[in-house]
Image (tube, rainbow, N blue to C red):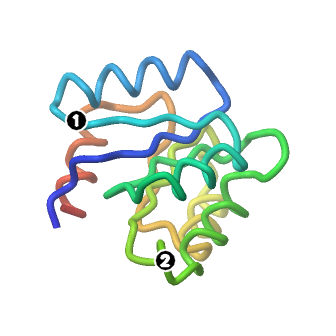
Amino acid sequence: MSIQNILLVDDSKTELHYLSDLLTKRGFVVRTAESGDEALRRLSEGKPDLILMDVVMPGTNGFQLTRTITRDPRYADVPVIMCTSKNQETDRVWGLRQGARDYVVKPVDADDLMAKIQALG
């Protein structure tokens, strides 16, 4: 599977702008969501090839949302990369246990993120 369409979930407009810009310049089609509810609406509109998921958000957090998405048969094959400022090993392990395929700590290193995306593609 080649990754082209990415759903970016983050409650920070700054992060959304930075990551959207970074990914768009590398040829990806990016849709954004600022909350868990909006992310689920975006999923129902069209299935992405990859989800970049923030953890700390109002309402449903990224761990909960990742678990919901990866356990839903419609979206179980969509890889999730946690993209968060939570840099503790326990956070990384918990994120992966919720179904995330990888974990990136903010501020995001562009080359590191691209390598992780390519590894999934």
Q: Residue at x 48, y 28 (%)?
A: 107
Judge by depth and name the residue closer to the eye, 35 or 93.
35
The number of discs equals 2
Tell me where residue 3 sits by quadrant. bottom left
Above or below: residue 21 compared with residue 73: above
**Residue indicated by mark 1:** 111
Residue 78 in the image: x percent, y percent? 39, 67
Q: CA distance from mark 2 to mark 1?
A: 30 Å
Residue 74 in the image: x percent, y percent? 48, 77
Residue 66's disc number: none
Above or below: residue 97 compared with residue 29: below
Residue 42 in the image: x percent, y percent? 54, 48
Q: What kind of residue is marked 1?
A: Asp
Residue 58 in the image: x percent, y percent? 82, 39
Q: What kind of residue is marked 2?
A: Arg
Mark 2, secondary structure of its residue: loop
The quadrant in which the C terminus is found is bottom left
Above or below: residue 86 compared with residue 60: above
Residue 30 placement, left or right of 14: left
**Residue indicated by mark 2:** 74
Give whichever of discs 2 and 1 has the lower sequence position: 2
